[in-house]
Amino acid sequence: MTTINRRRFLAISASAACLAGPAQASTLRQWSGTGLGARMTITLDHPQGESIARKAFVEVGRLENIFSLYRPHSALARLNADGLLKDPPFELLECLSLCAAAFRATGGFFDPTVQPLWKLYAQMWSQNRKPEEGEIASALEKVGWDKVDVSATAVRLAPGSSLTLNGIAQGYVADRIAALLKREGLTDILIDTGEHAAIGGDWPVMIDAGRMVGPIHLRDQALASSAPLGTVFDAQGQVGHILDPRTGLPAAAAWRVVSVTSSSAAIADAWSTAAALMNETEMLALFAQHEAELVLAEPL
C-alpha cells in the first residue's frame, strides 16, 4: 500500500500477475536512480525488467529537459528566460493545452502564470520578510493566461511573464510513463511521481492528511493531492506555496490536503491545485459539473 505525502520521489511498481505475453516473469527486482529532481525507484517482476526500467529512466530525463524550472537549458526555462520558444516540443504544447483547459474549467483558479508571484515570495522570504502590497500588485500585472500565446510553431509570453508547470507536470509525467510501460506490455501498473497513475489492478492508496485516510482503490485511474502548507516559504511554516492568481496571496489556511481522482494524472494534478484555493461551496459547484471527482478535502 502506498502513502501519499509531499516528498518528491518517483516510484513505479508493476505486478507480474497481469503482465501481457507468454513469457514467465522473473523474480522481483528494483532499480534506482534520479527523476524529477529526486530519488526514483522502479520495481518490476518481468523478464525484461532491466530494459524496461532503463527506458523509463531515459523518458523521465527527457521530460525533465522539457518541464524543469531548475535545468537552465530545459524548454520551459528557455521560454521563461527569453519570452519566446520556437519549435516547442510536442509534450510542452500538449501540457499547455491541458493548462488552458484547466484554466477555463476552474474559472481561473488554476493558472500557471503565477511564476512571477512565486519568485517574489521566494525572494522576499529568503530575506525573512513578507512581500509588500505594492510588490504583489506589480507581480500580478504579469499574471494571467491571456499573457500566453501558443501555436504549433512557437510559444510566446508577454513581457515579464513566466510559467510554472509544477501544478501539472508531475501528473503529466506519471501519465507519460504509464503509457510507456503499457506499450511494453505491462497491464498492472502504479506510477507515483507524488501524483498517482494506475493502469489495471486494484491499487490501494492511503492519503496522509494528518490522519491516514483510505484506502482509495485505483483501477485505470489517477489520484493527485495538493497540500497548501506542504511546501512553505517562511520558517514558521505558515505561508504556503499555492498562490491565488486573482489576489496574489497564498491559499487561505483552510485545507490540510485536497485529493482528486480523474482518468488523467495531469488533470487530477491541476484540479487538486485549483481546489486547494477554493472554499467548500466553490469546490462542490466545480466538481458537480465535471468528470474529475473530489475524494478528500481535509480541513486544517
Image (cartoon, rainbow, N blue to C red):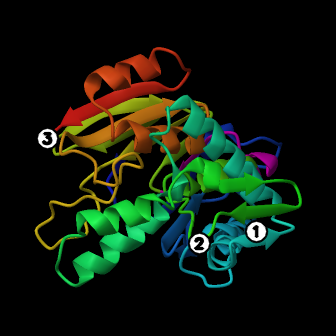
The picture quadrant where one finds residue 21 is top right
**Separation of disc 1 and disc 3 at Cα?**
45 Å
Dot 3 corresponds to which residue? 300
- Reading the chain from its start, which is encountered first: label 2 or label 3? 2
From the viewer's side, name the closer residue of 74 and 3: 74
Looking at the rendered structure, the kind of residue marked 1 is Ser
Residue 81 seen by the camera: yes
Q: Is residue 256 above or below residue 215?
A: below
Q: Position of residue 83 (x, y in %)?
A: 68, 72
**Separation of disc 2 and disc 1 at Cα?**
25 Å
The picture quadrant where one finds residue 89 is bottom right
Lateral position of residue 224 relative to residue 35, left or right? left
Q: Position of residue 104 (x, y in %)?
A: 58, 33
Is residue 188 highlighted in magenta? yes
- Reading the chain from its start, which is encountered first: label 1 or label 3? 1
- Reading the chain from its start, which is encountered first: label 2 or label 1? 1
Q: Which residues are magenta?
A: 180-193
Q: Secondary structure at mark 2?
A: loop
| Residue 51 tag number | 1
Crowding around mark 1 (Cα neighbors within 10 Å: few <14, some 14 to 19, many 20+) is few
Q: Quadrant of the C terminus?
A: top left
Q: Residue at x 56, y 21 (%)?
A: 291
Q: Is residue 7 above or below residue 3?
A: below
Looking at the rendered structure, the kind of residue marked 2 is Ser
Q: Position of residue 52 (x, y in %)?
A: 73, 63
- Asked if the residue under mark 3 is in contact with the one under mark 2, i.e. CB atoms within 8 Å, the reply is no
- Asked if the residue under mark 1 is in contact with the one under mark 2, i.e. CB atoms within 8 Å, the reply is no
Crowding around mark 2 (Cα neighbors within 10 Å: few <14, some 14 to 19, many 20+) is many
Dot 2 corresponds to which residue? 68
From the viewer's side, name the closer residue of 179 and 95: 95
